[in-house]
Amino acid sequence: MSVRVIARLDIKGPNLVKGVHLEGLRVLGSPERFAQAYYREGIDELVYMDVVASLYQRNSLVDFVRLTAQDIFIPLTVGGGLRTLEDIRQVLVAGADKVSLNTAAIARPDFIREAARKFGSSTVVVSIEAIRMPNGQYEAYTDNGRERTGVNAFDWACRAAELGAGEILLTSIDREGTGKGFDLELTRTVAQAVTIPVVACGGAGTLDHIRDVVSRGAADAVCIASLLHYDLLKRMGTDYRAGEEGNVEFLKQARNFSKVSGAAVGDIKRVLRESAIACRPAFESTSHV
Amino acid sequence: MQDKLEVKYGLPETVRYCARCVMSNQRPASSVEFKHGKNHRHRALHFDAEGVCDACRFAERKESIDWKQREEELLRLLDRYRRKDGYYDCVVPGSGGKDSAYASHVLKYKYGMHPLTVTWPPILYTDIGLRNFRNWIEVGGFDNITFKPNGRVHRLLTRLAIENLLHPFQSFILGQKNLAPKIAIKYEIPLVFYGENEAEYGNPIADNQQSLRDKSYFTLQNLSDVSLGGVPINELIEQHGLNLNDLMAYLPADYKDIERTNVDVHYLGYYLKWTPQECYYYAIEHTGFEANPVRTEGTYSKYNSLDDKIDGFHYYTTYIKFGIGRATYDASQEIRNRHLTREEGVALVRRFDGEFPGFYFQEVMDYIGMKPERFHQLCDQFRSPHLWKKEDGQWQLRHPLS
Amino acid sequence: MSDSAAPAIVIVDYGMGNLFSVLRACQSVGVEAVITDSKQAVSDAAAVILPGVGAFGVAMENLAALDLIDVLRDVAATGKPLLGVCLGMQLLMSESHEFGHHRGLDIIPGNVVQLPLIPGLGAASKVPHVGWESVEPPVSSREGHAPGSAWDGTLLEGLPGGEYMYFVHSFYCRPRDQARVLSVTRYGTFEFCSAVTLGNVMGCQFHPERSGPAGLLIYRNFSAKVASLKQGEQRAGQA
């Protein structure tokens, strides 16, 4: 079986943003530009997360989904603030293949069952954002890593699978954005407990981390953000324009973020194949992105 | 005809909100804390003719400042003070939060200075606060002097400040503002760097045009007009069994000593463009900083003010006294830095402002030896009628954010 | 002379399936396609795409309710191009064992059965099969052909063998006649049929509209086939 390499784009309004520990809204550029580049380079799937939808209690990704669905022909998962079946339907009609549910699902677990029944299990991804507790267990958080739920992440994953989720997108809030590597224990525990695919997210800082989360973390797919974005930003340069909304200081000052070494889609796939982990090959990089 | 409502604290009678950020005109400017008596009248946030607050105007001006030139000024300043004989050349106060992490690190590792970091610790360290403090020193790499005040005095003054002023943070603020200059005097390090200037948050713009921190904040000329916890010094000594030595930690440096040693206090935020959220990323990158795993109570943010269990109380009491909670402070700052739109700020304030600090509540009550009912009673006493009304047994703001 | 009355290609809407991505894939290769649930439109169409995501039994019920079963069989019988995608390919078969026993369209004799559980890298079996796998010509068809030409004349023409396509499924097709197998794919150690063909009917278990540029080539081939048939008709009409 091959492993999927997925790019995650955290989106706020018109911007691609990237935080650490799901905090901070540093703008990295326009999400279309990044999405198109990853598609051309051979990424297997894309995830668009509206990171403030639950927090601000709004939805705004539909237009962006529709826009990129015009010329991106790989699976697209969309999440962030999806609270009703109608929210899901709108996003699917706009061009998404799958939806990611977190806050609304924990608040009312039957929502998963209803969505799976109406749209098909394979359409419903349950996103679990987890923090390690002092006792070694993991707690699930909602609202972009802000609200405690008292829900054990492992138990919740099992329950979500029973309720009809097609996949679990599992993010370690402790690791995400830090470049320190995935949480192998969290990933493996969940991946070995459920029969649906588990996508590991959060913490990739080097290519070895990605190989490790597959071979030692039992991940069925890897979801990458910082590692890809900071590298692509360096290669593409910024499209920042003065006066734009958002925390654009990083772009303005043309700085570097040393916590992640940065890697392209091709690098990731090469390392996987070199480690005898099957995956769809990347495309030869074109002369300019 | 309605009776005229009482207006406490010398605040403006009419509540108005800034047209740009979400701050209200009830926001008090930073006080000179050791003159903060029971009948203190606060200087409130100024709005100009267009309804825009001073802090927003300052933020606007930040965009047109020539930062290259300001950095050159900084370089010249640092060149004058930089030492090569192995001794410290500047003092950076802080606790390992994102701002002091950035200030200390950039001064040492980018500009080649030799800072001595100085810490007046939180009243009650949170776990994450202590971790971040340790990482600041151990991962960031700095010498640090931490001054811990007498625990019994600290507890008493905290309680008195709550009872007399509903100001839980005063004992912390007193030390935080005073310690660095006193250490600078003692150790003969004539340069102190604070981070942002408080005018960024709406203290009078005049204070901010130059870098030097207004000396009235931290110098003392006459002991007799000093109050701590809302209680005059002589009363503290006569009625609470304290002596002068117990109180020195909370008093600022003597003016004569400042003059003699020529200690200069500067805002780094005058020389370097300050974006708090980017300080967060910088601290993650360089000093082992970690955000709060959950959002801090009363706000949506995870990177601001994490280290004191009393933080939540502080903002809850500003909500009680001024109708301004933590989400308002955080959102206003982020709106000024253009991370959020006003509309987004409003949504966040409506959702989180004034959230009761339940998580550490009992612990803090135990610390100061107060019954929870008494605290709630105090809150009710301190609400200004011109801000609050009681409807169906619930307190409501008369003029919530719009 | 252009036939402007009926759209060239219809995409059948029977309440299940990623219709919009299929539509967009058609548009991106320059083809006019229309989503419809109308029996008449399907019957009049020059070519039909049958997408599908979900359960076999429910799909057949929905098709029956729209009275589309015979119409689709007629489309195939009259030699019009018919492309079944994912569940749509499975529906072309005679029967399925998903959640009971259901009859299919029986356009290509065969049945639909559950994928066996395959150990994953972490020793856990995962259902459904989600991901990219390579698509190869079946061994039999490779013999006697120059490399790379096993698929000439089919909808997979122009694809090098071993191209990766995107799969999401728990069941797979077993055509009775091995000659119907257009491509095979390995899932772990298990090999299954990933595309079928019979005349102008084709089915692919994977989602060409989600398989990047390689998948779009299939839509391009489909559209070229429709165009060449139309040309053929026109020439025949003029003769």
Image (cartoon, rainbow, N blue to C red):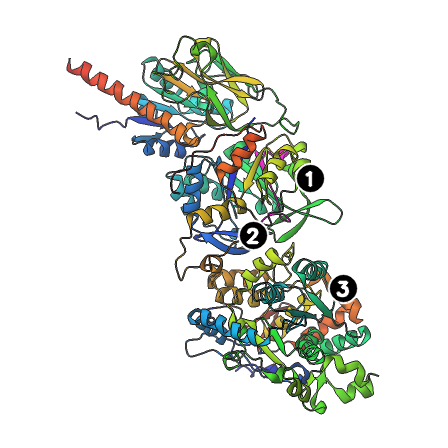
Q: Residue furthest left?
A: C238
The residues bearing labels 3 and 2 have C-alpha atoms spaced at a distance of 41 Å
Q: CA distance from mark 1 to mark 3?
A: 35 Å
What residue do we see at 56% from left, 72% from top?
Answer: B268
Q: Secondary structure at mark 1?
A: helix
Q: Which residue is mark 2?
A: A258
Magenta-tinted stretch: A161-179
Q: Amino acid at mark 2?
A: Ser
Q: Quadrant location of residue C3?
A: top left
Q: Is residue C149 left or right of residue B109?
A: left
Above or below, B67 relative to C218: below
Q: Quadrant of the C terminus of chain C?
A: top left
Secondary element under disc 2, as helix, strand or loop, is loop
Q: Is A195 positioned to the left or the right of B65 in the image?
A: right
| Front in this rendered view, residue A124 or B143 | B143
For this orientation, the residue located farthest to the right is: B241
- Residue B119 locus on image (x, y percent): 70, 70
- Residue nearer the viewer, B21 or B95: B95
What residue would you read off at disc 1?
A185
Q: Judge if badges 3 and 2 mark residues of a common chain.
A: no
Residue denoted by label 3: B362
